[in-house]
Amino acid sequence: MTEPDVGVALGPCVLVVDQQVVARYADAAVDHNPIHFDDDAARRLGLPGAIAHGMISGALIGRLLAAELGPQWLRHGRLHLKFIRPVEVGSTVVARGWVTATDPVSVELRAETSSGVIAITATATLEASDRQP
Amino acid sequence: MTRIRQEWDRMRVGESFGPYRYVVRPEVVEALRDAVGDQELTQVDGEAVAPAMLLTFPFLQLIEAKYEPPPGVIHAGQEFDLCAPVRVGAVLTCTGTITEMSLRRDRRYFSVSSEAVDERGVLVARSRSTAVYPEIDLRST
């Protein structure tokens, strides 16, 4: 990434979080929590129905940061994800970011559904001394 | 006392997890990339690497190796300090500690701080995961 300017928008990255995505992620993570597959189990916990793993949306934010910040992201990135609302299976999730500072590079991000439900808010930082020349 | 409450009461701030050995298998990396459509940074310095968010997997399994968490645990927060790319084929040794247990608005939260070191002795990442412990035991009918 070249030197970012404050206000520059990052993304969007878009993912349709359907049952196939949830199943594929669950197999990779070895996380078969019934709240991701069983509407009744999820409703017993007060959820609207089966929800996607929160880190599917988190991984979408990770994908966006890797694309925008490059290899230095993997060496010196800091990421703080806050899960705000669950994402129902079948939703389309869009991840976006905005550069808020350059020294160090800081990015505010969010992942939200196409219907406007904010799933995650996040802050990412890349220390200035770690930037590529 | 319910089983789920007994399990919660067994946990302690300061309790440690691991070491837990996790091999970054190429098929798992591919499954994650496929699931979330991530083909970014597949190679760094000539080595195949995984998306950094794959680290959630060993950090979760680190806890599960000690406790089988009740179904219904919900992820509430996740922090990463990334220190090195996650190489495909790397053997990670993960350790962690419960750093917080709290009751907020009638919900039980716990946080685990963890780190992963690869077989070369390189610190790959530090992490802090926060989750909500279920109040209802989905295992009971």
Image: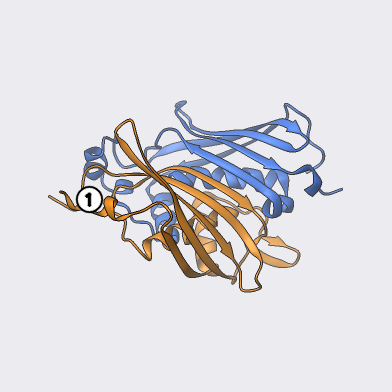
Chain colours: A blue, B orange
- Front one among A11 and B140: B140
Does any portion of residue B50 appear in the rendered image? Answer: no
- Front one among A88 and B112: B112
Q: How dense is the environment of label 1, judged by Cα within 10 Å: few (below 14), some, or many (20 and up)?
A: some
Query: What's under tag 1, amino acid-wise?
Result: Ile
Q: Position of residue A56 (x, y in %)?
A: 47, 47
Q: Residue at x 53, y 70 (%)?
A: B25
Q: Which residue is mark 1?
A: B4
Task: Please give the chain letter of the residue carrying mark 1.
Answer: B
Q: Residue at x 33, y 61 (%)?
A: B67
Q: Is residue B89 left or right of residue B59?
A: right
- Where on the picture, by quarter, is residue B107? top left
Q: Helix or strand or loop: what does disc 1 sit on?
A: helix
Q: Residue at x 68, y 41 (%)?
A: A125
- For the image, the number of numbered tags is 1
Does residue B108 lie above or below B29 as drawn?
above
Does residue A84 lie above or below B28 as drawn?
above
Q: Position of residue A126 (x, y in %)?
A: 71, 43
